[in-house]
Image (cartoon, rainbow, N blue to C red):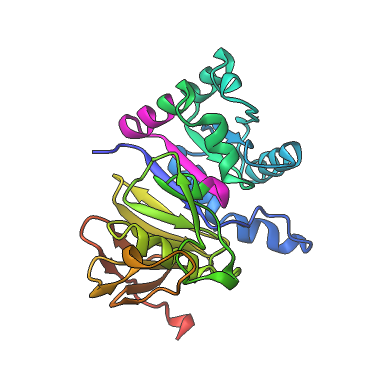
Amino acid sequence: MIKGTLIPIGGNEDKGFHKADRFRLDYISQGILFRVVEESGGKSSEILVITTASGIPEVVGKNYVDAFYLLGCQNVKTLFISSKEEADFKENLELLKNADCILFSGGNQSKITARIKNTQFHKILLDRYQNEKIVVAGTSAGAMCMSMEMIIGGSSKESFIKAATKIREGMSLIPEIIIDTHFIQRGRFGRLSEAVARYYDRIGIGLAEDTGLVIKNGNDCEIIGSGMVIIFDPGKLTHNNFDILKDGTPLTMTNLITHVLSAGDTFDIEDRTVKVTTVPEHML
């Protein structure tokens, strides 16, 4: 059984930087980053933010340091890895070994795999996630790289067409699912549905912005954040013509099971079952 906790986030999670001061602590103290801290062991936990995916790593790193500071965390470090060789520098491996939480920032997920995949850094990360009570979190690109089949591109306008979605091998932290982010805001329904048509033994997870999953035991998913998670389950497809079509041809799928879930709802990856929470009275 996997001992670590995985927290993929759909991007643009609240970092407490609202213009109106009265919103700052109210929102962030109830938000996704607070849950990341809680799952990592609290305010004294060692948090390592990996900014490798970003084109502006210094800015992104500072934003996370400041956000975690608002939550009372003092032990936050940032790390930018520019090559496979640098990933395996002794000091970087030590940072990884000592961290209670590793958080991958957004940016370009291909940079993460190009610079970290199949390194000693990657092997230690996988081993710690599988055998220790650590947290591996990631937002946007940092979430998408977690799966084995990693979406790297695909225009929303060209959705539902074979080969419109570009996929490469990811970091394989959780092979059972394929993750897409900024899902509702950028209309990425088509490219995730094509991904599960191609890999119909996987489950598609579409994360809205400021929304994430807390995944325990590599299986039990709890939705967190302010938005929705869209789940595509192709396990009972009655028709899927992906394998016989030429590239560029529109797809046909029937009986694609779809769930729309929000904070507090849960999903079991192995059993593919959903449990929804009771709606609070103030929302009725």
- Residue at (45% x, 66% y) in the render: 162
Say if the magenta span includes residue 200. no
x 71%, y 44%: residue:
63
- Percent of width and height locating residue 45: 51, 32
Q: Which residues are magenta?
A: 124-142
Residue 187 seen in this snapshot = no
Front one among 22 and 243: 243
- Locate the C terminus and report the quarter of the image it occupies: bottom left
Check the image and report above or below for 84 versus 33: above
Count up the numbered dots: 0
Indicate the position of residue 221 as horizontal and vertical percent values. Answer: 34, 56
Q: Is residue 257 left or right of residue 212?
A: left
Q: Quadrant of residue 124?
A: top left
- Which residue lies most toward the top here? 90
Residue at 74% over, 60% down: 18
Nearest to the observer: residue 170 or residue 15: 170
- From the top left corner, tell me how far across and down residue 74 is, in percent: 63, 32
In the image, residue 162 above or below residue 28:
below
Q: Give x and y (percent) for residue 142.
A: 54, 45
Whether residue 267 can be seen here: yes
- Tell which residue pokes out farthest to the right in this image: 19
Relative to the observer, which residue lies in front, 248 or 73? 248
- Residue drawn 25% across and 63% down? 272
Furthest toward the bottom, the residue is 284
* Left or right: where 180 falls relative to 74: left
Quadrant of the frame with the N terminus: top left
